Amino acid sequence: MPSVITANRLTDGVVVYLASDGEWSEQIANARVADTDEETKALEAEAENAERERRIVVGAYPMPIAVRDGAVDPLSVRERIRAAHRTTLTKDWYDVPL
């Protein structure tokens, strides 16, 4: 089953995906897709380096996906919510009067 690596950016908690260029992208469309277990393990090792050595992300893990019409599609509701960036508060939210 294809998968991508997802994590949260350490500086602000935003959901990010390991991209083809080795950087971390907020857009799941930019995620590097692993089609085999070996490819997934290689991406996990790269993500571990970003966590432990480079301290860019936290909580990286492989996420199963489907590729439909060339687009990356998260399989679980949880991951669909994370991909929509509805898990972090924005500055606008803080400015709402109570």
Image (cartoon, rainbow, N blue to C red):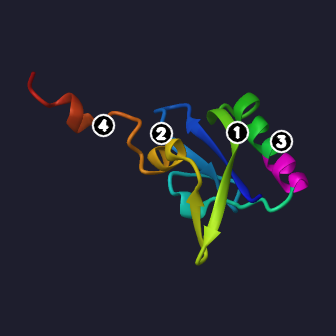
Where residue 2 appears, x then y in whole percent? 74, 59
Where residue 50 appears, x then y in whole percent? 72, 38
Where residue 28 appears, x then y in whole percent? 55, 57
Which is nearer the N-term, disc 2 or disc 1? 2
Q: Are marks 2 and 1 in contact (CB under 8 Å)?
A: no
Say which residue label 3 marks: 45
Which residue: 8% across, 26% down?
A: 97
Say which residue label 1 marks: 61
Amino acid bearing label 2: Val
In the image, farthest residue toward the right: 38
The relative height of residue 87 versus residue 28 in the rendered view (above or below) is: above
User: Secondary structure under badge 4?
Assistant: loop
Amino acid bearing label 3: Ala
Q: Nearer the viewer, residue 77 or 50?
A: 77
Which residue: 77% across, 36% down?
A: 48
Amino acid bearing label 1: Tyr
Which is nearer the N-term, disc 2 or disc 4? 2
Give the number of the mark in front: 3 or 1.
1
Q: Are marks 3 and 4 in contact (CB under 8 Å)?
A: no
Badge 2: residue crowd in 10 Å (few <14, some 14–19, many ≥20) = some
User: Secondary structure under badge 3?
Assistant: helix
Residue stretch rendered in magenta on the structure: 37-43
Res. 87 image quadrant? top left
Amino acid bearing label 4: Thr
Relative horizontal placement of residue 50, taking residue 8 as reference (left or right): right
- Whole-angstrom CA distance, mark 2 to mark 4, is 10 Å
